Each structure stands twice: as C-alpha cells, then as structure tokens.
Amino acid sequence: MNDVLIAVFSPPVAPPEPTPATSRIVFENGRPAYRRLVMRGALLELVTVGFYRFWLATDMRRHLWSHTSVDGDAPEYTGTAKELLIGFLFALAILVPLYLTYFLLGIEAERLQAFASTPLALFYYLFIQFAVYRARRYRLTRTVWRGVRFSMGGSGLGYAWRVGLWTLLTAVTLGFALPWRQAVLERYKMRHTAYGNLAGGFVATGGGLLRRAWGLWVLGWVAVGVLASAGTVAMSLSLSANSADMVTFSLIISCVIAAPFFYGIYKAIEWRWWASGIRFGEVSFESELRSSQLIGLYWKVIGWSMLILVAVSAVVGAVFVMAFAGLSDSSSSVEFVQRFVQEPAYMAAFAVAYVAAVLAFWTVTRIYLIHDVWQRVTQSVTVHNLGAAADVAEQGQVVSAVGEGLADSLDVGGF
C-alpha cells in the first residue's frame, strides 16, 4: 500500500537526456601545463640518461586524453610507466640478439656480394611495422571512455606483410598506389578495433583519397621532373658549370621551402579522409581540418630547429677555438686531435651540446607535432550518431606492453 501511495504522490522523475545525434570533440587548452611537463621531462631524461622517457610518455598521454572530451566525457589513459619500462626491458631481451645477428649477417653479406644485405634491411623494416601495430594495440587497450575499454585484435605479422607488399607496389607504381596502401592498412587496423562490443570499421577508399589529393601527386612529379632535368636544361642553354650548379641549387632550395606547404596540405586532406572513414558501429566521424592549421606548426618546428642548430654550432665552434688555442700554425691535425682527446672538458662539452640539442628538438616536436597537432585535429572532428554507443558492453582484454617496448626500443613509438 505504501508503495502505491509513493508512486501516486511522488513527483514524476524526468527521463534522462538523450545523447545528442551530433557532438563536437572538445579539447581543453592546457598548453602551458603541457609545456612545463615536457620541459621538466627533458631535464629528467638528461639526468636519468633517458630512463625517464617512460614516465614522460605516460604523463603526456594522460594529459592529452584527459583534456579531450566527447559529449562532456573525457577518456582515461590507464597505462603506467612501470608497464612501459618492463615492456621495454623485455623487448631488449628480444632485440639485442636480433641486432647482433643483423649486424654480423649484414657485414658478412656485404663481404660476399654487394647489396646482399638488402633482405636484412627489408626484414628490419617489416619488424618495425610489427612493433608499431603491437604498440597501437597496447595504447588502445589502455584507453577507457565512459567505463568501457577499447580493444584491438588482429595479427602484427599480418599487418607487417601487408605493409611490405603495398610498399613494394607503391614503389613500383612510382607512388600512384599510395592512397590504396593507406586505405588497406587503415581498414585492417580498424576492422580489428572495437569499443566494448561495438566493432570498428573503415569505409574510406583509396580512390577517395586520390580524388582529394590528385593535384599534389601531379605537382610532386612535376617537381621531381624539373629537378631531374635541371642539369640537362642548363647545359642545353650553354651555361657554365657554376651557373648550372646555381640553377640546380636554387631549384632544390625552392622545393625545400615549398615542402612544408605541400606536406601540410596533404596531411590535412589525409586527416579529413581518415576521419570520414572511421566507424564504430553506427557512429561516424567528420573532420573540418584546414591545411593552414598545420603549415604554421611545421614552420615553427623548422624555425626552432634552425635556432637549436645555430646554438649547437656556436658551442662547437667555441670548443674548437679553445682547442686550437696554444697551437702554432704549423701544428698538424694529428696534434690537434691528440690535444682534443687528452682534454676531457672538450669531449664533455661536445657530449653535453649533442644531448642538449637532441632533448631540445624532442621538446619542440612534443609541443608542436604532438600537442598542437592533437589539439587542432580533435577540435576539427564532429561525431555523428553518438547515441549508438550509449549501451555498449565491455569486452576485450588488456594486453602486455611488449609491443610498446619494441616500438620504443626501435625509436618508432608514437601516439
């Protein structure tokens, strides 16, 4: 009786708000905190001889994941630095014998016959692809959104041989098969990816990418043709050798300057194509990323890299000046080398300059090519039919970090 009275006289409970059909991905700007994180991490990497990289990678991912939200909820990165460290050490136990075997077989193969070590290089390339696939699998299984974990199956070996075959076909067709290569590889990865029991998929095609970017392919081959024929054209115009070299050099510089623009345009096209092809059940995505949002970042990386190079060159020049001090003009290069080696301060200065330059460059790339690219790409994405992911059941298992360790030890890790 009491239950009936409560049901009659209690105020009606408002039904839960339905999930919107369309939702923008929101990135909360935390660039100052991220910048401090990577700068502090670079210093700790220097102090710990690189071992802090596992903690830094974990902190970077947690920052990016937690500042990105879909429909008001941010994903959670559950991976730990300890997992990465153990995976790295386990991967080293696999890779050290492989490195040694690769090195010895390469020397022996070159001694027996020129270019005989090419198969070994191909094996190394395929092994890198295997590691990249397994690393992606690890990162996905450590990503949780609304209490449901992402998962990824498939075979790293199956992915590696697909990469090998399609890379060969791309080389044979002079790059024409690249769009289809990208589509096949993305389809394989997404077909084995899931959010809970919501299966992933990829519906974009190579033809679709080619239609979006065919002009870049044409301009690219025109540039290659111009560079290849520059010397011949200069000779046909009866130019001197110095003039011909200047023409070729000017064309090369022009291509180098134009490269960030072309690359930014292509990456924006590829990101939009990729987002349009991603599926999780009935959930789809759309990106409005503009090329201008990427080109500026690439030029900032180039500018900072040039400043780092100038600073390192100044340090190296100062070390050489100090090493030359006290030597007569008639001193031989052997005497200079002996003095340089006998002074630990000179060697230490070179080592510090080199390590500082590497860490500074990594800091620049982590800020501009990871954080800023992530921010621009995520903010450009719209999610359609998000309600299809409202009732998703958990499935899949957490995998080991060995794949991430392989990728990290091969220096091909990513996000």
Image (cartoon, helix red, strand yellow):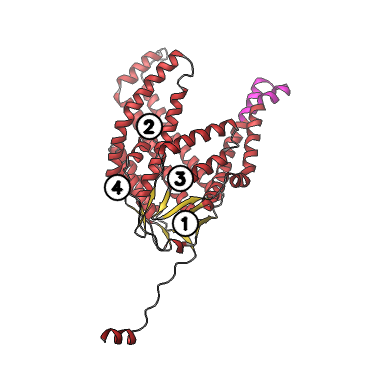
4 vs 3, front mark: 3
The mark nearer the N terminus, 3 or 2, is 3
Residue 293 pos. (x, y %): 53, 50
Distance from disc 4 to disc 3, alpha carbons, whole Å, reads: 24 Å
Helix, strand or loop for disc 3:
helix
4 vs 2, front mark: 4
- The residue located at (63%, 46%) in the rendering is 211
- The residue located at (54%, 39%) in the rendering is 181
Residue wearing tag 1: 281
Front residue of 226 and 326 = 226
7 relative position to 223: left or right: left
Residue wearing tag 2: 354
Instruction: Determine whether label 1 and label 4 are within 8 Å by CB.
Output: no
Distance from disc 4 to disc 2, alpha carbons, whole Å, reads: 30 Å
Distance from disc 3 to disc 1, alpha carbons, whole Å, reads: 15 Å
The mark nearer the N terminus, 4 or 2, is 4
